[in-house]
């Protein structure tokens, strides 16, 4: 980081990142659906369709199971809040956002885990068979995916000698040769698998299915309707943008703003939008040619991601 930044500039960066994640999350979902439809020979809905759906859901009646407790309405708020807190401090547009000093990798991973656990508890809170099934599956996946994510980013923190995400990005920019190191490639493989698992994408989960025997995420949110369902959708899309943005800037940080100024911040914003958009298109192309794994094979895939992450840490410790 190039010296201390003005507090107003840091606050503007965090505000820009939070606003971009909120607005861009549904648009990214629309982009992936549009690309998949085109590759499958269909016209598909417009890219802005998820925003239309959210507006429609926000105007509908809120319904809740009679047996649900305060956990059920609170979970969507926790899901959105945790994603936005991470977005405020993560190095997405610039390396020095307002809450960058608090963006420790352990804090970020456990904030994302808090959103996942809240949604799983809400699935259990409904008292339905589908909710319990989805929550059980989601927690089983999260029990392996979250440690893999933590260890993968830990491998990046070893050469940077810091677990702070902005510091890791700044160190990577100062030492470009690190970006092609073996530990980076191993950590990248683990990170990619975790992103797919955390966001319920193929081959871990199929976001477009409602088949009872294969649902994971959809089973947990079947009881949500109206504004609550809109919040769940918004929170999930925000998490996807945040994780893809971290993937882009931790492993290819070029273009991120390293100095205060309107021009550099504009370049950083455009760059991260382009990176996340490209990753979204790549995700859509990948899903078109990928089938969903059987449920009992998913832990094997995530265990492989964890092994890759551990190997990345070992290589980072051994190789200078």
Image: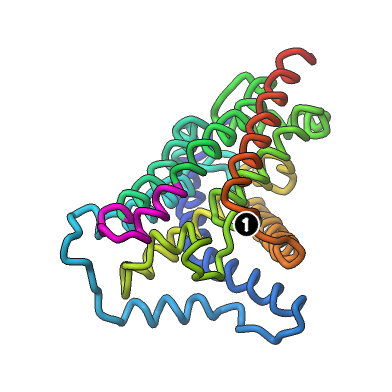
Vertical comparison of 189 with 132: above or below:
above
- Residue located 78% across and 28% down the image: 178
Residue at 48%, 57% in the rendered image: 216
In the rendered structure, the answer to whether residue 230 lies left or right of residue 180 reads left
Q: Is residue 101 above or below residue 197?
A: above
Q: Secondary structure at mark 1?
A: helix
Question: Residue 283 versus residue 48: which sits nearer the camera?
Answer: 283
- Is residue 28 left or right of 17 when viewed as pictured? right
Q: How is the image coloured?
A: rainbow
Q: Quadrant of the C terminus?
A: top right
**Residue situated furthest bottom in the rendering:** 43
Residue for point 46% across, 45% down: 86
Q: Which residue occupies the foreground of this view, 11 or 168?
A: 168
**Looking at the magenta stretch, what is its main secondary structure?**
helix
Q: Nearer the viewer, residue 290 or 161?
A: 290
Instruction: Identify the residue position indicated by label 1 in the image.
Output: 269
User: Does the segment drawn in magenta span residue 180?
Assistant: no
Tell me what residue is drawn at x 23 percent, y 52 percent.
Answer: 71
Residue 315 in sight from this viewpoint: yes
In the image, residue 78 sits, relative to residue 168, either above or below, namely below
Image quarter in which the N terminus is found: top right
Q: Is residue 2 visible?
A: no
Q: Which residues are magenta?
A: 123-138
Residue 297 pos. (x, y %): 63, 46
Residue 56 versus residue 67: which sits nearer the camera?
A: 67
Indicate the position of residue 257 as horizontal and vertical percent values: 65, 46
Q: Where does the image place residue 153, in percent across and percent down from the top left?
A: 61, 32
């Amino acid at each position: 980081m190039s010296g201390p930044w003005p507090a107003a500039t840091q606050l503007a960066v965090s505000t820009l990142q939070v606003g971009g994640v909120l607005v861009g999350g549904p648009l990214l979902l629309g982009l992936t659906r549009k690309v998949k439809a085109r590759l499958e020979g269909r016209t598909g809905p417009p890219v802005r369709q998820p925003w239309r759906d959210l507006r429609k859901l926000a105007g509908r009646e809120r319904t809740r199971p009679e047996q649900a407790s305060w956990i059920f309405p609170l979970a969507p708020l926790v899901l959105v809040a945790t994603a936005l807190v991470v977005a405020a401090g993560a190095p997405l547009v610039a390396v020095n956002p307002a809450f960058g000093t608090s963006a420790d990798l352990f804090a970020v991973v456990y904030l994302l885990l808090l959103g996942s656990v809240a949604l799983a508890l809400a699935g259990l809170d409904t008292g339905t068979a589908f909710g319990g099934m989805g929550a059980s599956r989601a927690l089983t996946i999260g029990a392996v995916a979250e440690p893999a994510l933590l260890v993968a980013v830990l491998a990046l923190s070893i050469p940077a000698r810091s677990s702070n995400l902005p510091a890791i990005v700044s160190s990577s920019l100062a030492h470009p040769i690190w970006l092609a190191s073996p530990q980076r490639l191993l950590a990248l493989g683990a990170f990619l698998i975790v992103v797919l698992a955390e966001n319920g994408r193929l081959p871990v989960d199929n976001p477009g299915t409602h088949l009872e025997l294969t649902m994971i995420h959809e089973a947990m949110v079947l009881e949500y309707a109206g504004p609550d369902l809109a919040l769940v959708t918004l929170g999930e899309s925000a998490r996807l943008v945040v994780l893809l943005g971290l993937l882009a800037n931790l492993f290819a940080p070029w273009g991120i703003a390293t100095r205060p100024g309107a021009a550099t911040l504009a370049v950083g914003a455009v760059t991260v939008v382009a990176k996340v958009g490209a990753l979204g298109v790549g995700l859509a192309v990948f899903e078109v040619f990928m089938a969903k794994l059987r449920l009992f094979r998913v832990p094997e895939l995530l265990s492989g991601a964890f092994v890759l992450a551990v190997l990345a840490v070992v290589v980072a410790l051994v190789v200078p």
